[in-house]
């Protein structure tokens, strides 16, 4: 089923008629939309001040939501990298301690040039 997009003007007209009508279902049928759609438009238009046209909030919200998901994914990847390197460092330290006994670094002699 193809979704039809209605203009803001049509939505406003439908909501105004909805406020004064007796039967919302009959109005929805007359306009060729669902009752749910009418209530959704009313809720959306109540958030916007009369005469004020705003950008679609859902557009901004979805962009921010997408960005947040991407950042969470990157954070999870970095956390996994940190865990990996911590584990690798622990293994290297354990090997060094088992070989050297004291766990201290071996001293090297400097050349006397």
Image (cartoon, rainbow, N blue to C red):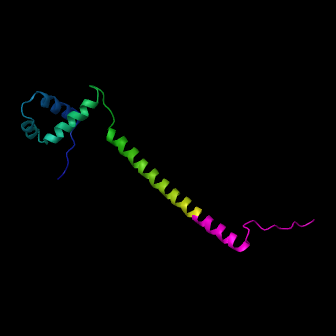
Q: 56 and 111: which one is in front?
A: 111
Residue 16: x and y in percent read 16, 28
Q: 37 and 82: which one is in front?
A: 82
Tell me which residue sits at (61%, 65%) in the image: 90
Picture quarter with the C terminus: bottom right
Magenta stretch holds residue 99? yes
Q: Residue furthest right?
A: 113
Q: 68 and 31: which one is in front?
A: 68
Residue 6: x and y in percent read 21, 39
Is 31 rendered above or below residue 82?
above
Magenta stretch holds residue 81? no
Tell me which residue sits at (73%, 72%) in the image: 100
Residue 75: x and y in percent read 49, 53
Tell me which residue sits at (19%, 51%) in the image: 2
Indicate left or right for 17 with 56 as reference. Answer: left
Is 40 rendered above or below residue 97?
above
Residue 54: x and y in percent read 32, 32
Q: Quadrant of residue 46?
A: top left
Indicate left or right for 51 with 111 as reference. Answer: left
Q: Quadrant of residue 63?
A: top left
Span highlighted in magenta in the image: 87-113
Is 28 rendered above or below residue 68?
above
Indicate left or right for 16 with 69 as reference. Answer: left
Q: Residue furthest bottom?
A: 99
């Amino acid at each position: 089923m193809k979704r039809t997009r209605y203009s803001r003007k049509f939505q406003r007209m439908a909501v105004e008629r909805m406020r004064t009508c007796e039967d919302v279902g009959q109005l929805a049928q007359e306009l060729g939309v669902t009752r749910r759609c009418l209530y959704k438009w009313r809720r959306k238009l109540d958030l916007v001040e009369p005469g004020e046209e705003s950008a679609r909030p859902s557009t901004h919200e979805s962009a921010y939501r997408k960005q947040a998901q991407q950042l969470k994914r990157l954070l999870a990847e970095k956390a996994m990298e940190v865990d990996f390197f911590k584990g690798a460092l622990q293994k290297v330290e354990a090997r060094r301690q088992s070989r050297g006994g004291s766990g201290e670094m071996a001293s090297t002699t400097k050349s006397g040039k």
